[in-house]
Amino acid sequence: MEPLLVDRLLRITDLFQRDMARAFAGTGLTTARVHLLWVLQHAGPSTQQNLARLCEVTPRNITGLVDGLEASGHVRRSPHPSDRRAVLVELTPEATQMMGRMQHEHTQLDETLRGAIAPEDRAAVDRGLSALVTRLETLVADAEADAGASRDAP
């Protein structure tokens, strides 16, 4: 029997998680910390409130993540230039270099994975993956809305 699509997607997720765990073994970087570094790499210096929104976690979780990354020398906090109540979080130069290497490796992996697909099939795979992401985002948003509505119901 052919594996279900969802089983294949779960296998891909598992393989990515295992590879990430291998790549960051011994560094003290968790998946959540790497995600925050990735967000900072792409968003640039940000307030913790903005980072919580971008990472879809609570402000309390962001505080813990930033504290850990600051202690390990990956990020630094600095005063916000126009809002003295806010603090900006930014990558340190070392973390910027590390994230640049990660971006390069990400690009290489993308090329390697695309190479496993026949050139004439790549556009169809891209369309299919985009459709899957869009549909799954809708399903998750609907489920979250339903869960919120049931919590709010008397």
Image (cartoon, rainbow, N blue to C red):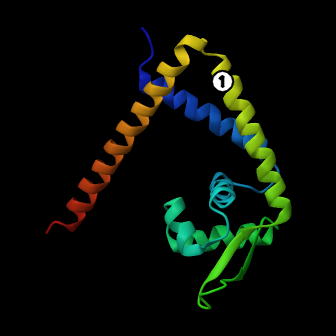
Q: Quadrant of residue 66?
A: bottom right
Residue 4, x across and y down, in percent: 41, 20
Extreme bottom residue here?
84
Quadrant occupied by the C terminus: bottom left
Position of 22 compared to 65: left or right? right
For badge 1, the amino acid type reads Leu
Query: Residue at image x 62%, y 87%?
Result: 82
Position of 121 compared to 90: left or right? left
What SS does tag 1 mark?
helix
Query: Residue at image x 35%, y 37%?
Result: 135
**Visible in this render: residue 148?**
yes
Disc 1: which residue: 113
Q: Quadrant of residue 45?
A: bottom right
Quadrant occupied by the N terminus: top left
Residue 143, x across and y down, in percent: 29, 49
Q: Is residue 131 above or below residue 141?
A: above
